[in-house]
Amino acid sequence: MRLSNTFLLFAVGLTQLMGGALAKAEDQRSGIAYVRSGSETLPGYFYKPEGKGPFPAIVMVPSASKPANDMKPPYQEMAKAFTSRGYVVMVPAWHWPIEFVHENAAKNRRMTLPEFQGIARYIAAAVTWSKGQSFVDEERVSVMGHATGGILIMLLAEQEIGVRSYVAFSPAAAIWSDRQDLQKAFVNSVRESKVPIFLIQAQNDFCLGPSEVLGAELAHKGDLSFSKVYPPFGTTREQGNTFAVAGSSVWGDDVFKFLQRSMN
């Protein structure tokens, strides 16, 4: 997959939601980042530790994108786990094709592989934004994604977009058996990726196919790549699938060790 006809224009500032006048990103602990790709402009949200940095950064790709008019700070607790350890966090928005906007789980089953690949360009845009900030160490940027976000970053992994590693939680776990095209694309991405990948699931996720199939591929890469299935998180499959969001106290040490090794 190649990204084409994409250009980026970023302007960062506090909005009325944050309650204040415009300020430089270097002076803010959080704020909105406006991402322009082609003819579309979508917001993202960034969090940073106190100080000027430069800090390592994580582009955190959510399982569902917030609407452009909903700029409540996303994933605050999850982001705090990273900023408390000295990482900048960028949470990019991305845009569903219009026919899927009002659907839920069914949209991932109906989305074509090229449509997923098209959405992934917003994640690459967020990486470029992050690397362009004075408070970010542009040589130490990694990407983490959950569920649909995991799908997007697995499709990016075959590209060289200037990141040091990927952390993928439950990529396509809810639709694994229905999407052989994604399975094949993920295997290819793992084989083509020039940077390490850490694949994570909880035992009670919707399906452990991603770990079973991709885990073997990751083990053969000969770099820092690996997969890990953690004990059940909660009591339901839905809770197991939200392990990324709610389980940082469980996976945190492993993820930060992986990031430290892959960024150094």
Image: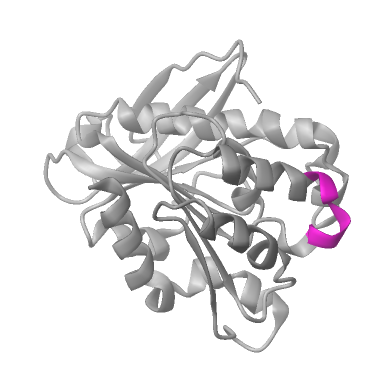
Q: Residue at x 80, y 55 (%)?
A: 104
For this rendering, which residue is in front, 132 or 225? 225
Dominant SS type (magenta) = helix
| Location of residue 106 with respect to 231 vertically, above or below | above
Question: Which residue sits at x=72%, y=37%?
Answer: 116
Identity of the residue drawn at 70% across and 71% down: 208
Q: Is residue 242 left or right of residue 139?
A: right
Percent across and percent down for residue 18 are 35, 44
Q: Nearer the viewer, residue 93 or 18?
A: 93
- The residues colored magenta run 175-181
Query: In x, y percent, where is residue 111?
Result: 82, 41
Can residue 68 be seen in this snapshot? no
Q: Position of residue 135 (x, y in %)?
A: 20, 35
Q: Is residue 87 magenta?
A: no
9 to 177, vertically: above or below = above
Is 85 rendered above or below residue 188?
Answer: below
Q: Looking at the rendering, which quadrant does residue 76 occupy?
A: bottom left
